[in-house]
Each structure stands twice: as structure tokens, then as C-alpha cells.
Image (cartoon, coloured by chain):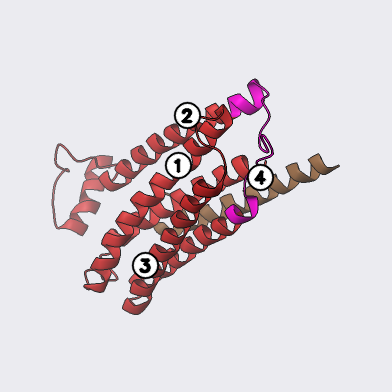
Chain colours: A brown, B red
Amino acid sequence: MLNPLRSEQEAFRFLLYVAAVAAVVVGLVLLIRAL
Amino acid sequence: MESASIAAGHGAHDEHHGPPAANVSSRVEAQFLGMLLFIISEIMLFGAFFTAYFFIRVVAGDEWFPIDGISLPKAVAGVNTAILISSSFTMHWALEGARNENRNALCVGLLTTFLLGLTFLTVQVNEYVHIGFSPQDHAQGSIFYGLTGLHGCHVFIGLTLLSFATIRAFRGHFTAKEHRGVEVPGIYWHFVDVMWIFVYSTVYLL
């Protein structure tokens, strides 16, 4: 399981996951608002 | 029995036999526990500010920007976000350099991370100067300055830690085995970036 507190590598991977999820959520919300 | 086997495992590593000292846990590393408690306290701190933000937008139903014809500079903040995220890549590159005994990658990576972070902070201060409203103008302004300012303080702390790590890297203090002085600021720096993704998404984009 990913633990961002264990090492910098895992913290970096966690950051990439958060960025990807945030991009999807923001994109969906903006898309729904535009419709 | 279990604690004895854990102690034996630690003993092989630290050349220490018998149970751990009374003030040392055999289950949780002190460094890990410290970082965990610190991050939890940080999440609660940011959570308080986000609560105020969501109260204004969801509970009170007040308008969000543009207010009085003033919009938030989404494009400038977007470029600033890209700068901050890219600094996490250079931080990761620096750590990989430390792990592989590549001193040039470590030094250049840390220095680049520091300069990118400094650029982010400079752009944010410039944004405050030209944005056209102040914290006391309205609740939305207070929340905007509160959230972005709180994050800016964390960037400043991160830059301070990075400056120590960079100076130590240039002095050759880190090796492939011992580079905790870069690892911990690295974890903190990625945490600061994660928080900015939340701040930028909610305050500027949504």
C-alpha cells in the first residue's frame, strides 16, 4: 500500500496520483457546469 | 515472543541485542511517527481554512469570484502551479542522484528545486500586489489570502529546509546510504505541492 510518509519516492508517487485525480475531478465539474 | 524477534531483527542491524530501550518503540520508527503527527496537524490546519471556504460557498451560498468585477488570475496561477509541480520533479531527481551517488544530479536538482520554489513565491507576492482587493474587503478576500498565504508560509519553510539541504549537498554531506537530510525535506516539499493542488483546484478553478 502506498504510504507517502515512508519515503520521498512514495510521497512523489502520491503527488502524481493526487494531481491526476484532481485534474479528472476539476475537468468533470467544469464540463458538467458548461452543459 | 514477537517483540523478541523484532528486537533480534533490530539487533542484527544496529548490533544491539535484547529488547529495545524503554523509550523506543519496537513497532513504529520515531522518524515515521514524527512525520505522521506533523502531517496530521498540517491537514487539520489546512482543514480549518478549507472549512471556512466551503462554509462561504456551500452553506452561506455567497458568490465567489469575480466580485465587483475583479477575477482571480487563473492563468498566472496555473503557470505558477506548473512551476511548483515541476519543482517536485527536480526534487525527485535530486533524491535519485543521492541514491545513485550522483553528486551533480543531487546538487543541481536541489538548487533547481529551490529556485523554482522561490519563483513560485515571487509570482504569488506579485499576484497579491496586483490582484485589486485586500483581506479586509470581504469574507472571500479573507479566505483567499488566508488559504494562499498559509500555503505560501509552507513554501517559505520548505525553501528554508531546501537551502540547508542544498548547502550540505554542495559540501558533500550526503551519501547513497545516508541522505535523510534530503529525504525529509523532499517528503515535506511533495506535501506542500499536494496542498497547493487542493488550493488551486478549489480557490481558482471551481
Earlier residue among tags 2 and 4: 2
Real-space CA distance between mark 2 and mark 1, rounded to the nearest whole angstrom: 14 Å
Circle nearer the viewer, 2 or 1: 1
Label number found at residue B110: 3
Residue that numbered label 4 is attached to = B205
Instruction: Determine the secondary structure under disc 4.
Output: helix
Residue located 53% across and 28% down the image = B51
Residue located 13% across and 53% down the image = B16
Check the image and report above or below for B160 versus B41: below
Crowding at mark 3 (Cα within 10 Å: few <14, some 14-19, many 20+): many
Check the image and report above or below for A2 versus B50: below
Residue that numbered label 2 is attached to = B48
Circle nearer the viewer, 3 or 1: 1
Real-space CA distance between mark 4 and mark 1, rounded to the nearest whole angstrom: 18 Å
- At label 2, the amino acid type is Ala
Crowding at mark 4 (Cα within 10 Å: few <14, some 14-19, many 20+): some
- At label 1, the amino acid type is Gly
Crowding at mark 2 (Cα within 10 Å: few <14, some 14-19, many 20+): few
Tell me the magenta residue range.
B54-77
